[in-house]
Image: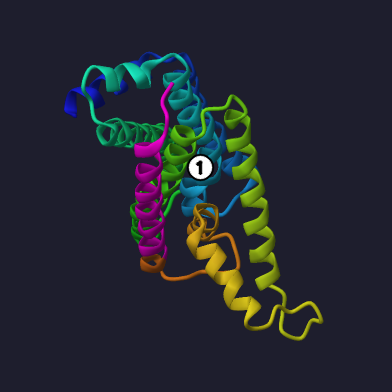
Amino acid sequence: MRRLIAADMARLWQWGPFRLGGAFMAVYGICNSLAHFYFGGEGLEGLVLDFIIMLAYVQAIIAVGFIHEDHSSGGLKNKLTVGHSRGAVYMSHLLVQYLAGLIYAGLYLLPVLLLGQRLIGGTAVQAAGVLARLGCYTAVLLSFTAIYTLVSLLISEKWIRVGSVAGVFLLMRLCTRIDYGLAIPETAPAYVREPLRRLYGLILDVTPTGEAIQLMGTGFRQPELWVLLVSALGVAFLAVICGLAGFLRKDIK
């Protein structure tokens, strides 16, 4: 399986869209740092975590596009023909795309930490909080990656490339609206009451987009980080199990 992962990673590294995505994240980090400095922002913590939503869209384009291309070019069938198991093929794509997400996050964070610390500054307390949230983000990133891998390996139609981005956008809008609804004060007529209020919170906790919004710390609902960590790992685990089960039965053409 190590050879399979190495081969997939080498092909991804040479893939043009992957390099463009990396360049975009690096430039986004530089521009975002300058924007926070000149126009004001939410401090160093807000700047550091500001990539989470953007990376969800970028990863949807890159991960789904790369895996779909591997399928349409006959790469998946060739891997199975030479003796790789379906489970190994699935896990290779999952791990490679997860590593790609970490690389993208690093390409954003590198200029942000170099420029942001000089331009904005920050305290040791803020740094500790940022590190804790970034640690939790590794689990949220895994949940996004697991779902992208599931979708791209089980659905081979061309529309999935656009559909994945559209799906992330719609889920992001839904979770934003839900968070906004929870912020309505109890004295207002539109206040969300139980049990709907609990359902709203559950949706935010069990969807990667909801986890991302809460992790950034800009929304109304602010659960403990361990709640987001456990929820994200749970989503990733279920997505991997369902994806593997479907891929083992899928007819590869």
Task: Judge whether residue 236 is colored magenta.
Answer: yes
Position of 119 relative to 202 (above/below): above
**Range covered by the magenta-colored residues:** 228-253
The prevailing secondary structure element of the residues shown in magenta is: helix
Residue at (41, 56) in percent of width and height: 235
Could you say whether the residue bearing mark 1 is in a helix, strand or loop?
helix
Q: Is residue 204 visible?
A: yes
Q: Residue furthest left?
A: 2
Q: Residue furthest right?
A: 189
Task: Judge whether residue 190 is colored magenta.
Answer: no
Does residue 160 appear to the left or right of 170 in the view shown?
A: left
Q: Nearer the viewer, residue 133 or 70?
A: 70
Residue at (47, 70) in percent of width and height: 223
Q: Residues within 10 Å of mark 1 (few under 14, many from 20)?
A: some
State the colouring used for the structure image. rainbow
Q: Nearer the viewer, residue 200 or 56?
A: 200
Position of 202 relative to 136 (above/below): below
Q: Position of residue 94 (x, y in %)?
A: 34, 37
Q: Considering the image in quadrants, where does the C terminus appear?
A: top left
Q: Quadrant of residue 232?
A: bottom left
Residue labelled with disc 1: 51
Amino acid under label 1? Phe
Q: Considering the image in quadrants, where does the N terminus appear?
A: top left
Position of 237 relative to 96 (above/below): below
Q: Position of residue 138 (x, y in %)?
A: 35, 49
Residue at (64, 44) in percent of width and height: 169
Residue at (35, 43) in percent of width and height: 244
Q: Nearer the viewer, residue 107 or 189?
A: 189
Q: Is residue 134 visible?
A: no
Q: Position of residue 35 (x, y in %)?
A: 60, 39
Instruction: Tell me how many marks there are.
Output: 1
Q: Position of residue 33 (x, y in %)?
A: 53, 38
